[in-house]
Amino acid sequence: MEEENQVVVEENNRLGKDFKSAIIIGVPEDLNDQIQEFRKKYDKSFVRW
């Protein structure tokens, strides 16, 4: 399994993919409920997060 993971990492590096960084958007807390309702309706990964 570790060899398979290494192959995936090497392939991603070759393709220029970087999974070590993230971008966040900070919003005012008073908008949080509206944003979460929107995400619940449209974001397939809502439950996971």
Image (tube, rainbow, N blue to C red):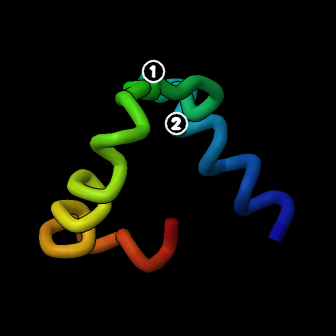
Q: Residue at x 17, y 61 (%)?
A: 38
Local SS, label 2? helix
Report x, y in % for residue 25: 38, 26
Local SS, label 1? loop
The residue at the far front in this view is: 30
**Viewer-proximal residue among 21 and 34:** 34
Q: Residue at x 45, y 27 (%)?
A: 24
Q: Is residue 27 left or right of residue 7?
A: left
Q: Residues within 10 Å of mark 2 (few under 14, many from 20)?
A: few
Q: Residue at x 45, y 24 (%)?
A: 23
Q: Amino acid at mark 2?
A: Asn
Report x, y in % for residue 16: 45, 20
Give the mark count: 2
Q: Which residue is mark 1?
A: 16
Tag shown at residue 33: none
Query: Is 17 above or below relative to 1?
Result: above
Label 1 and label 2: CA atoms lie apart by 6 Å
Tag shown at residue 12: 2
Q: Residues within 10 Å of mark 1 (few under 14, many from 20)?
A: few
Report x, y in % for residue 42: 14, 68
The N terminus sits in image quarter: bottom right
Q: Is residue 31 left or right of residue 26?
A: left
The residue at the far right in this view is: 2
Q: Is residue 40 left or right of residue 47?
A: left
Using the rendered view, name the quadrant where residue 45 is placed: bottom left
Q: Residue at x 28, y 42 (%)?
A: 31
Disc 1 + disc 2, Cβ < 8 Å: no
Query: Is 7 above or below relative to 20?
Result: below
**Viewer-proximal residue among 37 and 7:** 37
Query: Is 49 above or below relative to 22?
Result: below
Using the rendered view, name the quadrant where residue 39 is placed: bottom left
**Viewer-proximal residue among 41 and 18:** 41
